[in-house]
Image (spheres, rainbow, N blue to C red):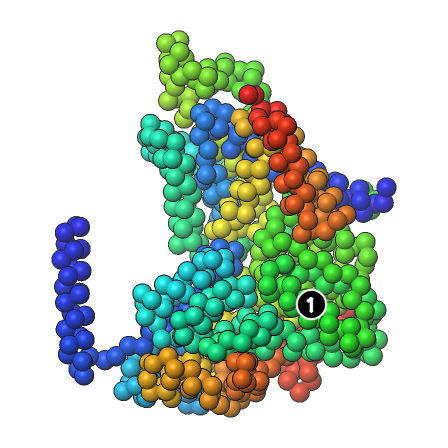
Amino acid sequence: MSSILLQVIVSGLLIGAVYALFSSGLTLIWGMMNVINFAHGDFVMLAMYTAFMVWTVFGGGPAAAVPIAALILATVGVLSYFLLVRHVMKGPMLAQILGTFGLALLLRYSAFWYFGANFKTLPDNILGPPFVFGDIRIDAPRLLAGTVGLLVTLALHLILTRTALGSRMLAVSEDATAAQLMGIRPERMQAVAWALAAGSTGIAGALIATFFYTSPTVGETLAIVAFVTVAFGGFGSVPGALVAGLLIGVIEGLSAYLIGPVYKDVIVYTLFVLVLWTRPQGLMGKM
Amino acid sequence: MVRGAGRFGAFAAALVVMGFAGGAGAQQTVKIGAIYPLSGNAASAGNFSKAAMELAVDLINNGNPNLKDLPLADGKGLPGLKGAKVEIVFADNQGTPAAGQNQALRLITEEKVVALIGAYQSGITVTASAMAERHGIPFLTPESVASNLTERGFKWFFRATPVAGDFARAYSAFLKEQGKAGQKIGSIAIVNENTEYGNSVASVIKEVFAKDGLNVSQVIPYSANTTDVQPQVLQLKEKNPDVLIFISYTSDAILYAKTMKDLNWKPSIMIADNAGFNDPSFVSTSGALVEGLVNRSSFAVGKPGSISAVINELYKKKTGNDLDDPSARAMQGLLIVAEAINRAGSTEAAKIQAALKATDLKATQVVTGYNGVKFDEKGQNVLASSLITQMQGGKYVPVWPKDKAAGELKLPYKGW
């Protein structure tokens, strides 16, 4: 295999892990309460601006930005739940969809107002030089984001499947009334789910900011990938998002490299439709 | 609150009615519509253009004593219309051809603008100007370069900027000269975004280069606003062309600059076809990664006291940034339209159209580096021109042709 082809695959895996990282929050919310958070991409955008502010105000790198963004976004998530989602969930399906969509626009245009339309980037060498193995180069920001992506999705999966908190959250998602009879407070569990989902999205955004540009509309660009990843992997499945993210990253990279960048979306979406055709619940979703 | 607002609305409406009834006493305002990307991924560039056009309106309405040669910049409004003030109504094209078309319709039918300017992206200028054509309202594009725009047989369409063919010939002459001077130009790659702008400029460059015997060995079209450009850069790394030409908007331009450094590949000459690479936010975020990047521009800051220098100072005071080339062209576009309306002495569409057709501005009367403004029967400014600049120390410096150069051309491309 030529070294360039190997580099394409490595780069695809890295960007795929990043896709998985910023998709896991979206799939978690869906799995917990059957709500699609259309503001997800704009949560990522907020986290990216947080990383940018941490750098410009305190000179802090990702080590500072990641926990700060996770905290801020977790708070935003909980607030969104109590002030908006909890109420619109009582309304018709359309209200739920438009509710978070409205939140997305609110966040996006607030960013336009506060930060302006200009593109921002963090300094290019914020994480030092790339790792070089022979002809293969792995740049530090993507490696960090990819690795943390794997760890965060793993951690979310373990929280959901191996802890008492996870069991209570799953109980609420399966039958909120029955869970309530067992002494679980559904609203509290759903708020926790929003905190976890938005918090992990905060981590994702702060890391993506190290190698991507930040602008008020960056959430739009990223959210499409997140929705595809979640549907591909199976709505509500965190491991599914991981597998789908990696697959999409590598398929995108290979098809762009071997056939041409304008065809990569055609190929990814063809596979996407084929998967949904044979498995409507996604790769790892439950029926 | 609501009732208060209603009452205020009624009051305002009454004032408007009185204004119309009063006629002579009230000063007239001429509305010009401007369709630009104020949100979406090109919003950064769109907002810089907006600031430049606002500055032009301020010059017309309030004047500046240091700009005697610039038509209308004496602050007397439009003397041909009894000193009417100019008002510019901005509309957001959201980066989509559909929104651009809708906004054109809204500006024409609801805002009653007398002329339209826009729309930055060539693909959006296509739809927005078609709407103006249908309604018989003049449409001037200050910056869209796709060649087919002036080939549609439109009667109401005007273009002030030089076009793809002009750049392609400039790039070709520039590259041949560098080849003679010993630079490698044996293989040339083009990377273009695949909307109207990128596709048309790429195909014109291919055509002109083929005629001139330059070898375009690789063309990589890609979808704009992508999340990842690593595969494209790796395709380049594999073929390793001597010359690379980028035709991209800002978001992708930033990713290319970063990714080329990450994957450690660069050509010996790198050319950017304006657009994203001239967005001040590209220059501030990525300028340090593309030292030696060759670009085209129609605007360069001249000697102190010249129109371009005075305007640049005013713009810097307003925005904190130097005036960039697309924004300078947008400003020039507005000044051309205002000058024509003034000469028409009327807000009637047909009279403005006739005045635009008769436009004859000299090189000394324009902000940009054009040799003047004069439209041919297709609406193309035949005096538009551009020069080659190079990124040096975080700024674009004119380097070619020699008689317009302000700095020394430095090759090969340095990058980061």
The percent coordinates of residue B312 (x first, y second) are 48, 77
B134 to the left or right of A274 = left
Residue at the location (58% across, 28% down)?
A280
A34 to the left or right of B211 = left
Residue at the location (40% across, 17% down)?
A176
Residue at the location (39% across, 39% down)?
A98
Total numbered circles: 1
Q: Residues within 10 Å of mark 1 (few under 14, many from 20)?
A: some
- In terms of image quadrants, where is residue B39? bottom left
The percent coordinates of residue A76 (x first, y second) are 41, 36
Residue reaching furthest top?
Answer: A182
A78 to the left or right of A137 = left
Q: Is residue B152 above or below residue B241?
A: below
Residue under numbered circle 1: B203
**Is A119 or B406 nearer to us in this picture?**
A119
Please give the chain letter of the residue carrying mark 1: B
Residue reaching furthest right?
Answer: A1
Is residue B55 among what the camera can see?
A: no
The percent coordinates of residue A268 (x first, y second) are 66, 41
At label 1, which amino acid type do we have? Ser
Task: Say which quadrant the C terminus of chain B sits in.
Answer: bottom right
Residue at the location (45% across, 35% down)?
A37
**Is A217 or B164 nearer to us in this picture?**
B164
Q: Is residue B18 above or below residue A160?
A: below
Is residue A261 among what the camera can see?
A: yes
The percent coordinates of residue A200 (x first, y second) are 52, 33
**Element type at mark 1:** helix
